[in-house]
Image (cartoon, helix red, strand yellow):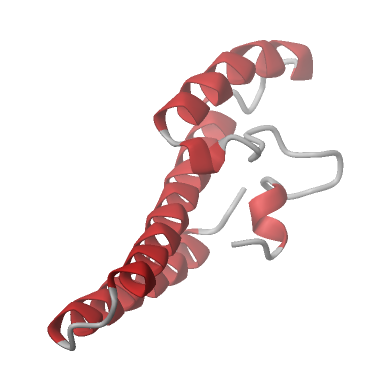
Amino acid sequence: MVERQEITVRLRRVEGQIRGLQRMVDEERDCETILVQLMAARSALDKVGLLIVSNYIDECLSGEDPKVKERVIRPLQFILSRYSPSLESEELLPSEGSSANADSQGKN
């Protein structure tokens, strides 16, 4: 499970990205550069959302059999991937020996 502090740090990072985007617009930077940064901020926010959902699922299904947990999580993963294509390759299920998911291993 990802700690609340890690989620807060990630949200502050996204907040900084948004402030940077505001500066870029004020400075009339080129559209391509702004759009690239916008997509990066959106992806980072999507990943924070996925961490929050993953934590919620871990809490709700903490005592469940791993097979039951997987049966519940796989459809949710599909639904979330439809909502946000940037999450398509992310995992909701923790891999063996990990604390939350692939994102908690330093990817972002």
User: What is the total number of numbered labels drawn onto the structure image?
Assistant: 0
Q: Which residue is painted at 57% across and 25% down in the image?
A: 77
Q: Which residue is painted at 47% across and 67% down in the image?
A: 5
Q: Is residue 50 above or below residue 68?
A: below
Q: Position of residue 6 (x, y in %)?
A: 52, 65
Q: Is residue 98 left or right of residue 46?
A: right
Quadrant of the rendered image containing residue 96: top right
Quadrant of the rendered image containing residue 58: top right
Q: Is residue 85 left or right of residue 92?
A: left
Quarter of the image with the C terminus in it: bottom right
Can residue 55 be seen here? The reply is no
Q: Is residue 99 above or below residue 11?
A: above
Q: Position of residue 15 (x, y in %)?
A: 30, 71
64 or 104, nearer to the observer: 104
Q: Which residue is painted at 55% across and 20% down in the image?
A: 78
Can residue 24 be seen here? The reply is yes
